Image (cartoon, rainbow, N blue to C red):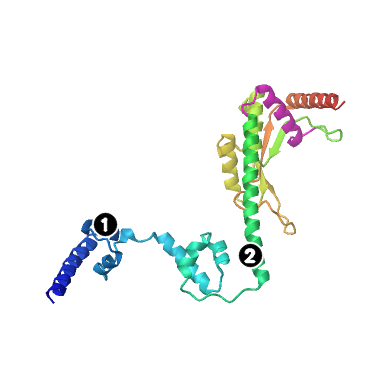
Amino acid sequence: MTSATSKYADFESLREQAIALRREGLSLRQIRDRLKIGNNDLLNRLVKGEPPPDWTKRPRAKDDLRDRARELRLQGMTYDQIQLELGCSKSSISLWVRDLPKPERRDPTEQAKIAARKRWDHELQMRDAARRRTKEAATDEIGAMTDRELFLVGVGLYWAEGSKDKPYDRREVTIFVNSDVDVIRVYLAWLDLLGVARERLRFRVMIHESADVSAAERYWADVAAIDTGALGKTTLKKHNPKTVRKNVGESYRGCLVISVLQGADLYRRIEGWWKGIVADAGVRLG
């Protein structure tokens, strides 16, 4: 009897110490090391009824994920479906929902569709990664361009996208229109290389009337490094309600039109440069 009483007194004394440490904010591991307790069952009995400190709890984001997994399980989703929805591991899902009833067995064709979707998603990720690697390697191949390389790029760029003189419409003017900001920047660098002073350039925006015109004007003014007040009058394209346009949304900013004042001589030189490139290409083709 005396031995039993002594053991009870020792347990209560140890419990008081364990509870005090728990309330100070110590974890179970810290209490175990502090009190030299080697038995986990005894440790749990000593702190029974005492909530763990907040810092030992799982992150809230994980709790939210767990709650969502349980909701989806109650809706009848399988582990594969929950994994596709939440992007977490099956092992975690199993721990979170193992106390919930299993959903009814699915049609094998549906299971096959889920598996196929997972394989396809993985395939798409692999393809995207391969695309990125190819593009990054190609970018590195260019390196720093020489002035001549930029000169030739600019000639080809203008002849593809710039205004051209036609036998039925004699206009020797240098006007370039494009919606791609990178193309615009290369073209401006090319004009700088040719020594065309910025004072000779005139800028204006061309855009559908249903778009955010003011935002587009600010965007292109930043690209051209000018104030919006220096832009010419914006050309608004009339909207045809019968036409389904794909160039919509915040990313749509219309086109920037760049004109070179007194650009007839420059145009003639561009045309001549292009004919020189074509002639050399013809020689190479034999």
Q: Which residues are magenta?
A: 143-164
Residue 53 appears at what percent x and percent y?
A: 29, 62
Helix, strand or loop at mark 1: helix
- Of residues 44 and 205, the one nearer the viewer is 44
The amino acid beneath tag 2 is Ile
Q: Nearer the viewer, residue 148 or 270?
A: 148
Q: Splitting the image into 4 quarters, where does residue 12 fall?
A: bottom left
**Residue at the image point whose x is 68% and y is 30% from the top:** 260
Q: Quadrant of residue 205?
A: top right
Residue 285 falls left or right of residue 226: right
Instruction: Please say if 1 is above or below 212.
Output: below
The residue labelled by disc 2 is 114
Cα gap from disc 1 to disc 2, whole angstroms: 45 Å
Q: Quadrant of the C terminus?
A: top right
Question: Badge 1 is on which residue?
Answer: 30
Instruction: Give the x, y percent position of residue 36.
Output: 23, 58
What number is the disc on residue 61?
Answer: none
Q: Quadrant of residue 44?
A: bottom left
Tag 1: amino acid = Gln
Determine whether, in the image, residue 123 is placed left or right of residue 89.
right
| Spot occupied by residue 137 in the image (x, y as percentages of width and height) | 63, 36
159 drawn magenta: yes
Q: Position of residue 77 (x, y in %)?
A: 56, 71
Question: Which is more toward the observer, 178 or 141?
Answer: 141
Dominant secondary-structure state across the stretch colored magenta: helix
Front-most of residues 42 and 82 = 42
Sequence-earlier tag: 1 or 2: 1
Residue 172 seen in the figure: yes
- The answer to whether residue 7 is magenta is no
Asked if one can make out residue 232 in the rendered structure from this viewpoint, the answer is no
- Answer above or below: position of 19 versus 169: below
